[in-house]
């Protein structure tokens, strides 16, 4: 139980997410434009689809739509990652899932820090996709040693940020004044720096190894590289982007357009080329530029069970055997066509997804259930069929490795597809993190089960 004098971790997270959004809006104006477009589209969708509005109202998530966003950072060392875990924990964000991007030619592995549990998620689902550079994948040994030395010398957290995190850990929370300071100090870690901490020459060597290596090693801190609002109709936003002067990537990542959205669909606009000054020998600066920050939007659908996820993976795989989306977008129409065709074998009504055991749902009593005099505690399917219980899809709160790779790549430039030996290494990642990552499936299954138990309790109460 949290001490009443302390600010709830959900509230610290909300304050942090709002502060990040305000900062990114001033740093990357196109983000503000995108936010406006998303808000407009969401209002249109809700007006045109009363059923969706009712569902979101009933499941308590209508208010949160406009607040929803995720961000991403890339860290350089195990020490940075484990400190980041402690910082996020103060905000009720915990590492969920392991993502290996080395298979896609991106030398990082990652987790998502996010709230867990239905209650915390409905308060504010803000999450941060957090990558750790796989320095072991830098082939050039000399460069690797230099990069390690540079990273070892930087401090990405302010002293106060560390002190306040320690204070929160010992006390079990922060009072309002400390929580405000904590958010202000933590924001510093995510800020953009237009002065690199390396020379132009070093930057180019790092860049030649991989753009991502340059992005991580050349700067004082892990600038937030995108913040992503959630839309209820990603196709509408994708189509609307050019008229606002924003050029989206050619295809939407993830599943195709469907009546019942599953998992996650994402699209992004290309990273900006931003002015950066590099250290020069004489203590002065040389003008240059760096490309890192971009914009992204997402549409979230139902969380899939392992069975549903296996079907999703196999259909995505089957599509990519027919056609691979080209980086320049030249075969985008054909790809989307093939994707839609292949995914026809994925059921597309909520009930068929549910009865086939492909997705996770929460269950709650209907009006009839609440009024019922005596109900036999049948299986939940029976209770649904008899109209005592309704079901609603559980939103997928995580990420997709193939999509993430597509997002990384579209922003690294077309030449970025590089070959690393694919070597997922969850054990190393967790050692760096200083903790295990949570299993996303277990988490959704627990939310589903809790809702079923709750229905049963309520119905039993009615019976007595
Ligand atoms: C992270 C890319 C992954 C997503 O939405 O899949 C991601 C990065 O570019 O650092 O954010
Ligand atoms: Ni993203």
Image (cartoon, helix red, strand yellow):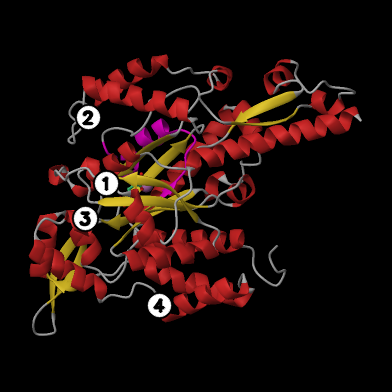
Q: Are marks 3 and 1 in contact (CB under 8 Å)?
A: yes
First in sequence: mark 4 or mark 1? 4
Vertical position of residue 294 compared to residue 456: above or below = below
Disc 4 versus disc 3: distance between alpha carbons?
A: 24 Å
* Distance from Cα at disc 4 to Cα at disc 1: 28 Å
Residue plotted at (35% across, 45% down): 99
Q: Residue tagged by mark 4? A: 158
**Disc 4 residue crowd, few under 14, some 14–19, many 20+, Cα 10 Å:** few
Give the quadrant of residue 47: top right
Lower sequence index among marks 4 and 3: 4
Q: Label 2 crowding class (10 Å Cα cut-off): few <14, some 14-19, many 20+?
A: some
Q: Is residue 127 magenta?
A: no
Q: Secondary structure at mark 1?
A: helix
Which mark identifies residue 325? 2
| Position of 118 relative to 337 (above/below) | below
Q: Is residue 107 above or below residue 198?
A: above
State whether label 1 is within 8 Å of ligand 1: yes
Q: Provide the residue span drawn in magenta.
A: 228-249
| Residue ID for mark 1 | 408
Q: Considering only order in the chain, which callout, 1 or 3, is on the residue closer to the N terminus? A: 3
Q: Position of residue 350 (x, y in %)?
A: 56, 22
The answer to whether residue 196 is visible is no
* Kind of element beneath mark 4: loop
Under tag 2, what secondary structure? loop
Question: Front-most of 322 and 146?
Answer: 146
Q: Position of residue 104 (x, y in %)?
A: 23, 41
Q: Are marks 2 and 4 in contact (CB under 8 Å)?
A: no
Q: Which mark is residue 212?
A: 3
How much space separates mark 3 and mark 2, taking CA atoms?
22 Å
Label 3, label 1: how many angstroms apart (C-alpha)?
Answer: 9 Å
């Amino acid at each position: 139980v949290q001490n009443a004098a302390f600010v709830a971790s959900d509230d610290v997270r909300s304050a942090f997410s709002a502060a990040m959004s305000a900062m990114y809006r001033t740093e990357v104006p196109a983000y503000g434009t995108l936010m406006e477009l998303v808000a407009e589209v969401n209002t249109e969708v809700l007006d045109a689809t009363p059923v969706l509005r009712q569902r979101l109202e009933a499941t308590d998530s209508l208010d949160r739509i406009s607040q929803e966003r995720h961000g991403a950072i890339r860290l350089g060392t195990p020490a940075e990652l484990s400190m980041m875990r402690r910082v996020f924990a103060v905000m009720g964000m915990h590492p969920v899932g392991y993502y290996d991007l080395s298979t896609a030619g991106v030398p990082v592995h990652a987790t998502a820090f996010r709230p867990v549990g239905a209650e915390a998620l409905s308060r504010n689902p803000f999450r941060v996709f957090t990558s750790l550079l796989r320095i072991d994948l830098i082939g050039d040994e000399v460069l690797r040693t230099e990069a390690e030395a540079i990273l070892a010398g930087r401090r990405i957290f302010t002293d106060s940020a560390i002190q306040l995190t320690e204070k929160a850990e010992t006390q079990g929370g922060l009072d309002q004044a400390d929580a405000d300071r904590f958010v202000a100090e933590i924001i510093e870690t995510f800020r953009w720096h237009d002065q690199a901490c390396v020379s132009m020459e070093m930057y180019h060597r790092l860049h030649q190894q991989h753009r991502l290596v340059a992005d991580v090693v050349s700067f004082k801190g892990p600038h937030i590289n995108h913040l992503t609002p959630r839309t209820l109709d990603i196709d509408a936003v994708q189509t609307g982007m050019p008229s606002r002067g924003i050029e989206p990537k050619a295809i939407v990542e993830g599943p195709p357009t469907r009546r019942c959205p599953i998992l996650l669909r994402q699209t992004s606009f290309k990273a900006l080329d931003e002015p950066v000054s590099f250290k020069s020998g004489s203590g002065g600066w040389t003008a240059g530029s760096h490309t890192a920050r971009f914009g992204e939007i997402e549409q979230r659908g139902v969380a899939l069970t392992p069975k549903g996820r296996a079907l999703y993976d196999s259909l995505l795989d089957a599509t990519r055997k027919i056609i691979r989306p080209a980086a320049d977008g030249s075969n985008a129409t054909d790809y989307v066509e093939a994707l839609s065709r292949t995914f026809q074998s994925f059921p597309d009504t909520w009930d068929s997804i549910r009865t086939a055991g492909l997705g996770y749902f929460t269950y709650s009593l209907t009006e009839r259930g609440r009024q019922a005099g005596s109900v036999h505690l049948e299986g939940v399917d029976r209770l649904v069929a008899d109209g005592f219980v309704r079901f609603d899809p559980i939103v997928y709160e995580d990420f997709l490795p193939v999509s993430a790779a597509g997002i990384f790549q579209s922003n690294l430039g077309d030449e970025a597809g590089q070959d690393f030996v694919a070597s997922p290494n969850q054990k190393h990642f967790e050692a760096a993190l200083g903790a295990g990552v949570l299993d996303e499936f277990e988490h959704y299954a627990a939310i589903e089960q809790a809702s079923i138990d709750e229905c049963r309790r309520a119905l039993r109460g009615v019976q007595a």
